[in-house]
Structures are given as C-alpha cells and as structure tokens.
Image: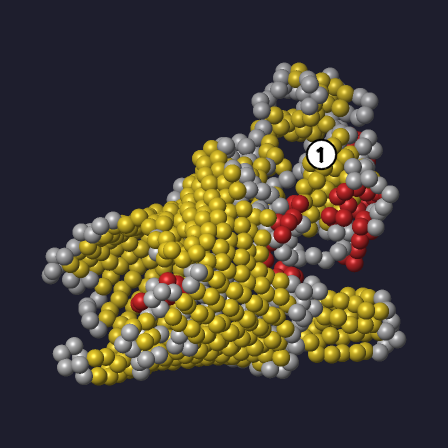
Amino acid sequence: MVGASAKDFSQEQKSAISPGIYSADVFVNREWKGQYEVKIDATSAVYVNAAHLKRFDIKTLTTVTGHKDADWVMLAQYLDARAVVFHHDSFRLDITVPQADVIAHDKNWLPPELWDKGISGLYTNYNLLYSKSRYRNSGDDQSYLYLSLNSGFNLADWHFHDNSYYYRRQNAEAKWVNRSRYLEKSIPAIDSTVTIGDNASNANWFDSFNFRGLGVKKDLTMLPDSYRTYMPVIKGNADSNAVIKVLQDGKIIYQQSVPAGPFIIADLMPTGSRSDLTLVIENANGTTNSSVIPYSAASGMLRSGSSDWLFNAGQLRTGSQLDKCYFSQAEYTLGINNYLTMAAGALLSSKYKSGLVGTSVLVPYVGTLSASFEQATLHDAQSTASGNKSKIAWNRYFSANTNVTVSLTHKNPGYLTLNESDSVSEYISDKIGYQAQEKNNLSISVDQRLPDGYGTLSASIYTVSYWNTRNKSTQYSLGWSNSYNDISWNLNAGRRLYRENYTDDYSDDSNVKYYDESYISLSLSIPFTLFERPGSITSALTAEGKNYSSSSLNWNQQYADNLRYSLSLKNSQNEKTTAGGFVSWDTPAASLTGNATRGSNYSQYGAGASGSILVSRYGVLTSPKTGSNFVIIDAPGVSGARVNGNESFTTNASGKTLIPYAKAWRKNSYYLRSEAGSDVLGNIKQIAPWKGSISYVKYITDTRQTFSLRATDAQGGALIFGASIFDRQGQALGYVAQGGLIYIKAEFLPDYILIKTDSKNSCIIRNVSLAGENICK
C-alpha cells in the first residue's frame, strides 16, 4: 500500500503543474539570477526564452546558438534534466550545475536589465526634537524645537529631493533653512546620475561647494565591485595547461584552471588584508612559477582601465543665498595600469580660474603615493590673487600589521577656493594682504595591531599653520584598546599646543598667548544579560593636565526587541553629580525617545520622534527607520509577519510594511515568516532597486484555514495515504495522511469533498463534519 500510495502521490504532484507560462524566480546553485517567464509543457519539461539563456551565467548555455530571442528553449537539451527543478508551489526554478560551469560575478550585482525602477510616490524622513532646560540660580530657562525633513517625490525614475530643517529657540526668531533641493535621474546607459537644482558639487579632487545648476556624475555604485574597488589586474602566460593561484598572507584568495597561453585575472576582490599578493602558476609538467604583485589599498586608486568623472555648471550658492558667480567644473580620473592612476580637472568662472592635476602611484615595497597640484587665479575689478595648493599623501601597510598614513597640504598665500574668491574682501586686506589663511596642514597616523590578546595601538599627530601670523596649532594623541571575554576598554591620551598672536586694543602692542592642554581618559564596557535581554555597564574617567576632570557610570539595557533604556551618573570638577535617563521605543509608526537630566543647579528634559512616511497607490505606510531607498513589502492578508526577523518591519493588518533602506543597484533579499497560520508561498524575494527608488515586492499568500478530520471508505477501512482531495469545482484542497486523517485547506469547511484514491477511482464525502462520521462513498 505504501508503494501504491507513493506512486499515486507522485502522479498527483506531477499533474499539479499545469502546462503554461509562469513568472518564476530562477536560482543557479541557490544564487538568485532574477525573475523570468518559464514555460512548462505537458511532460513538465521546462523552457526559457533564448534571449535569457546568457543571463543565468552558465557556460554551457552561453554557447547555445541557432535560436531567435523569442524562441522557447528546453533546458534539458543542454543540461541534465535532473538538474532542472520547477517548484510550482513557490514559482521557483532551481538549476544545479558544477561550479566550474558557472561564470563568476560579484555576488550581489545584477545586470542593468534586472534593476527595478520602482513606482511613483511621496515620502518624508523626519526627525523632531524638543528640549527644555531650567536653571535655578539665574532663572534663565531655555528651550528649543528642531524639525528636520528629508523628503522627496518619485515619478517613475525621476526623483525630486528636498532637505530642509526648522529651528526655533526660546526668545529668538525661528529659522527655516533649505540645505538642498534638486531633481535627479539615473542613466544606467552611461553609468551616471544627472541632477538639476540646489546641490553640492561632490567633486573628488576639488574642494566641495554648493551651487544651483546642472550636475552629471559617474555613479560607480552602478558597476560591479570588481570594477569600482581597487585591486590589481593580473596578466600572465601559462606554458601549458595550468592552475593559477593568487595568495595573500599565505592564503589562497583565487584559483582557476587555464589552458596554455595568456590569461588575465580582472575580478579579484579585497579580502580586508593589505599585504602584497603572490601569483603562482602550477604547470601540467609539475613546474611552478611565482611572482609578487604589489598591492596597497588607497583612496584615489582605480583599477586598470576603469574611470571616474563629473561635470557641474551653474551658479554658486553660499548658505541659502545665490551669488553672481556662474561657473563650470569638470573632473576625469583614469586607472592607467596597476601602478598608476591619473586625474585632471578645471573650474572656470568669469573672474576665477583653477586647474588641477593629480595622480596615485603604487610603488612596489614602498606603498601608495598620491599627489595633486591646483593653480587658481582671481581677476576682478577690486582684487587680483593667484596661488596654488599642493597635496601629497603616503600610505603603507606593513606585514607586521602596521598601517602608516601621512598627508601634507601646502597653500600659497594667494590661493583661494571658489567660495573664498566670491567673498574675497574677507580674505584680503589692503594693510596686511592675506589674512590668517592656512599655510601648511600635516597629519600622521599609525595603527598597530598587536599580537592576539594584546589589542590595538594608535597614534596621530596633526598640526596646522597660517600665513601672516605666527598662530599654530598642534595636536598629539595616543590610544590603546583591547578586550577580554567580551569586556572591552580604551585608554587614550592627548595634548594640544596652541600659539595665538593678538594685538592689544588699547596699546597696539603685539602679544602672544600659549595654550597647553593635555588629557588622559579611560573607558570600560562590561556586557551582561538580564532577564534574557542584553545590556552593558560602561564607565569613564578623564583627567585634564594634572587635575581630575570628570567621571561617569552608565547602565544600558534592552527591555524588549524594540524598547531600550539607559541610566547615567556623572561627576565633574565644575559641578556636583548629575543623574540622567534615556529611553527609546520603536513603534510601527515612529521611533520615540525621551530623556531627562538633573544637576545641582539645573534640570533638563526632552523628547523626540523620528521615522519615515510614504504615500503611494498602495496607501500610506510608516516606519520607525529612515532612508532613501524604499521597499514596500506586501503579503496580502498576512499580518504580524517579520521581514528578515526584524521586529521593526512587521506587516500590518493588510499585510504591508515599509522598509526605508535598500542597497541601490545590488540584490537585496527579503525573507518573510508568518507565525499566524497563513502560508507565504515563495517567502524569499529579491530585488535590485534603482538609487532613490520606491520598490514594490508582493508575495503570494494563502490565508485559507486548515481543517483536519477523520474519514473512512465505504467498508470502514482507512483511505489510501497520499490521496488528493478536491472541491466541487475541481480545486485541490488537501490530501489524506496516515490513519485516515484528512487535511483540508479552505476559506470555510466545505460540505462536499472528492477524494481521488488512484488515477481512475474516486469517492465523495457529503456533509463533511469535523467531529462526526465521514464516510467516502
């Protein structure tokens, strides 16, 4: 009976896949490749469009020829039929092939034709803060209200952005300030983004400024990580069939078999280490060749053959005001080879001109050197200025886990940025020339990872000097951090030396003030678990010079998945002990906070709310989180389901929730789990959204109730295990389990069910009862 029932059950499963065309998620070796139309024939064979074969990144399918793009191609003609499985319950197609037959790509990058432009909608990210302070002695109470709005309106792939804030302090005039307001459109065909309106210049080599106008910039995030993330492109030649390996820190990070002849490795990805690479070629005859490939991760370096560029044109904007300065700006950066990246740029206006050249060079065994030189000239009716800015930086990672970075910037006295040139009177005086402009800026940082168990050391020096004054500022800092059994601590020390030249207002005598400020601080964090909830105790002690400065003790506790609080005590040299508390609660609509502090002569309390609101054709949705890439999750009829296990993203009564952040141009996966008894078919969905888009992801759900009852055949015997159950319309309702137990899934308990005991025979139960007798006749 078991064999017969298994056979019948298999036949029923097979017949459940009706011939037709379905939209299915396609997975190759469990990696999502996108959603495509697939055709199922009467034999359950799977077909796909010939135009889609290359998108699956299977070497065997990329060589298929002789078909028009619209032709249906049976996968079993080119792949093992057992490797192609269509799951009709979740509309998922799984293809399993040897890994060697898979074309390697960045894991989360998808081709542009699979990117989702999104839907139209209106949104805002808000942050509302209120605080009030009371002072016992002076009676000078203070309060303020702050509201920040980062809003937008999406019309298909056109995105309008507005970033503004409102600020009001007690007894002061309220302010409404707009930071930026612009229209944005991405153009994947040229890997770029166009903006029109009030925005920042976002240059890579020039100093940034605000303007109103047109901006076009290459968006490297559209490209695979192997293009935009610097790693050497390795070229070589194999004397015979060979195995090539790339090692870093003695570990293999890349391995591939190649035929005799030249080869190229262009898709290496950073591993987190910055050690040099070793290329090993193992030839078929047993001989081995190896060579060192210098590598040092540094900003400014591009992969060989890759590029970056931008163009801006418009009107300079300082604060919220427009100036009479019209300009155009361009930059271009090119990765020449593994060792050299070059850049050039120009910034032009009617009275200001600036040209720039820059380079990043990877020197074997020395590290990465980057340098730039900018020459700027100002000519107008009132002033003339000319100068240059030079910058050089060096970065080197040593095998002893030491990283050293040095940066030096020098500016001539006549050098002005575009912003400074527009308000030149603030920088140029008839008496002394150029006032207090930066001359040299030097920074040195060293990070040393100590042997396991001893932590990390860090040290830095920062100094800056100015023209036409002897003012100079120098800062030193030294730190050590470590942990033991989840207990962590940080020890930091620093010193600031500052010399200020000034002129006495009464005697016109020149004087010099010297400042010498030093500090040392120790902080400690101890984690714990209370009522199965994580928490921590942190303490800190600070001394300035030779004197005690302050100490603090904080208790941080998670009360629930979405509720946290902290209690604090602080003592300082200038006042007695103060006590405070803070609480945050993430509701489905907003993240709410409250705080209060009480000191010896003052008290303070405040509250806040933040989150996002989205309006679209799918209704009004809210979230306690904020972001710029929105995803609407829709599981009709399934409430209380969490997305990726996150309580902040739980479906509402209609089955929807809002996720306000997603990684643009990359695959984002969303797993939906319901504990309310409803089924979510194909509960994992993936989407690759456009930058700034509003994406809509809908799940197929089954909200029918599950009924279980017992039944027998006409002779009182058990029904055949695995037999399928149907209603009057022939819709499948369930199956027969062991011992004659029947499982039915339906909106309501049917009064009539048809049970197919095998492919030819069936019986009917009328007046179905959960507790009574059910006989199949």
Measuring 54% from the left and 53% from the top, which residue is drawn there? 216
Q: Amino acid at mark 1?
A: Tyr
Which quadrant does the N terminus fall into? top right
Dot 1: element: strand
x and y percentages locating residue 473 in the rendered image: 34, 79
**Residue 537 is at least partly visible in this image:** no
Q: Would residue 434 appear left or right of 136 to someone viewing this image?
A: right
In the rendered view, tell whether residue 346 sits above or below residue 371. above
x and y percentages locating residue 27 in the rendered image: 70, 47
x and y percentages locating residue 405 in the rendered image: 50, 77
Measuring 74% from the left and 79% from the top, which residue is drawn there? 291
Measuring 79% from the left and 40% from the top, which residue is drawn there? 69
Which quadrant does the C terminus fall into? top right
Name the quadrant containing residue 775.
Answer: top right
98 or 692: nearer the viewer: 692
Q: Which residue is mark 1?
A: 22
Q: Would residue 458 appear left or right of 97 to someone viewing this image?
A: left
In the rendered view, tell whether residue 462 sits above or below residue 115. below
In the rendered view, tell whether residue 640 sits above or below residue 773. below
**Residue 115 is at least partly visible in this image:** yes
Q: How many marks?
A: 1
713 or 392: nearer the viewer: 392
Q: Residues within 10 Å of mark 1 (few under 14, many from 20)?
A: some
Measuring 26% from the left and 75% from the top, which residue is drawn there? 549
x and y percentages locating residue 191 in the rendered image: 61, 53
Q: Would residue 31 appear left or right of 591 to someone viewing this image?
A: right
What residue occupies the far front of the structure in this picture? 381
